[in-house]
Image (cartoon, rainbow, N blue to C red):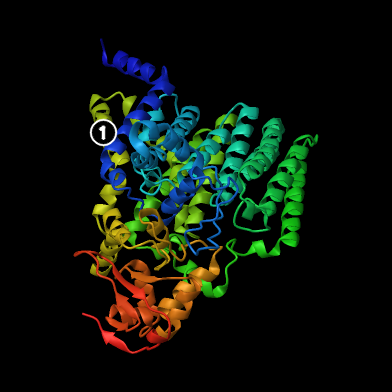
Amino acid sequence: MNDGSVWVQLLERLDRHWMRRVLLLWVVIAGVYLWQRWPQIHWLVLNDTDDNMRLMQVRGLLAGQGWYDLRQYRLNPPAGLDIHWSRLVDLPIAALFLLLKPFAGAAWAERLACGIAPLLPFGVVLVALAVTVRRLVAPVAWPLAILFLFGCSSTLPMFMPMRIDHHGWQLACLSVTIAGLCDPRKGRGGALVGLSSAVSLTIGLELLPYCAMAGGLVALRWVWDRAEARRLAVYGATLAGGSALGFVAFASDANYAMRCDALTPVWLSVTVAGGAALFALSRLRLETRLARLLAGAAVGGVIAGGFALAFPRCLSRPEGVSQELADLWLNNVREAKPIYKHPLRLAVPIAIVPVLGLIGAIIASWRARRDPEQLAGWAAITLFTAFAGAMLLWQVRAGPAAQLLGVAGEVALGWLVLSWFATHRSTAVKVAGGVLAAVLVLAGLFTATLIQQFRFDPPNRRTQVVNRASARCMSLPALAQLNRIPAATMFTHVDLGPRLIVATHHNGITGPYHRNEQPILDVHHAFQGSADAFRPIAARHGAAYLLVCPNMAETTLYRARAPGGFYDQLAKREVPDWLEPVALPKGSPFRLWRIRYGASADRTNTVRSE
């Protein structure tokens, strides 16, 4: 058998039953990740505050908390915190827990549910990417998409076991949107884009700009080609209907208010009106591109103008926080900073995939210029990837979406190079192509790791100290030691609050959730103000204890902004005598005091703590 026939058989096998092979790969990869992350599963390691809060939301649901009541009552008791999410992402976690509980018990069912749940949207992403590159590159190019996905240093962590927050599901929706934009069947493609956008918005508004961009691309296809009217009509109908259904089924009681930070009546009015308007546009018999462009621009202008007139406050940042809270907290969130304000060791691995993807998409668009269907798909990918790259210049949190969007262009670039080598007459060139293929495989698997090894600007010692302290204070064994103390409300850092209520029976003050401005400000004022100002704030929240994690990232801000403030004094072991030290086991990363109130404790003298 000659080499050519071997390659033909291999390609035929990749094409035949490709869906089964993708799903099999998903199962294998999921198994590897579960094995690799078993220590994190065993110790219920949920490093992100949102993952911890998501688990508390699921616990509340399973314990009988109302479907539309998403308040977290163990922070800022008794009123609780207003959490702006929806219940949609809670469902797979809760379902896995109920499925596993009879076999594994409650504690292990919870751990396993947190480990397995993020891998479900990962499966959706693998299938959607495979569909996209099969349509745009080649039927047998889908393995390259999966390989290059492993070079996405920002995207991949969103699907790792224990990453149970909603970002993985929103990225899955984005991957379906890409597949829908490239679908040659107009009705099905429009439905995929509309429904995936509606689901993403029901989950949260993080990908709102991408949903808007997807709608704009569907409209542009109709402007260019009137035959795309069916895609536009189905998209408009499914966007409007899906958003309305998502709001009715999943919006919390709090999200019926006119807020700008979730799928509230504010954004629901936009999606319903916009979807209806696009559906109406698709029914117009406009023969020229200019007429369709003017009509689309007019409709877009009316909707945008109406939004600006009806909801002017939503034209600024959607969180709607005061300038004080923005300066003290929100502006210091690392994800909210542009990519060029991050160190190179973080910025380069994030940017390389979108850049390569954009180059590949541009080349693929040029090569497809004589095939209208292919050109339309690649033009959408090119514009979407360029848009995502521009979003990185606004906030680095756009990294996962930008990398995901760049994969198709990367595959096109890699396939072009490999095809040239494979079809060359020279055996030496073909061998070189085989070597290059191996390099591409390794690059796809290890790009992020290899780039990070260059360590353009390695973290300094201070950063290492902060990272170590934060990890120790979030650990289950360290926090579990606090359960020796009878349940009480502990005054602690904003970022420690969600983890505290997951791992202990104690209540906290707040978490990093913007709707709860006053509790967050109270914590910052308490730690950055004077020692005299602390106790009245703590008393308002019914705090019986003060819990601090020295060198945690948040505490560095307290000391930097308020030298001589209350936390700075504690860090220097200058402790007021109305704080009674509570002994903790040796090696504990925490410092804990009982807060004494009343006349006997109304002295503000400080003592040097050993």
**Residue 408 seen in render:** no
The front one of 357 and 562 is: 562
Q: Residue at x 43, y 40 (%)?
A: 407
For residue 265, side relative to residue 451 (left or right) = right
Residue type marked 1 = Ala
For residue 471, side relative to residue 182 (left or right) = left
The front one of 575 and 394 is: 575
For residue 577, side relative to residue 91 (left or right) = left
Which picture quadrant has residue 375?
A: top right
Q: Residue 100: image x %, image y %?
A: 39, 33
Q: Residue 413: image x %, image y %?
A: 40, 37
10 Å crowding of disc 1: few (<14), some (14-19), many (20+): few
The relative height of residue 124 versus residue 466 in the rendered view (above or below) is above
Q: Residue at x 43, y 64 (%)?
A: 508
Q: Residue at x 37, y 36 (%)?
A: 414
The quarter of the picture where the N terminus appears is: top left
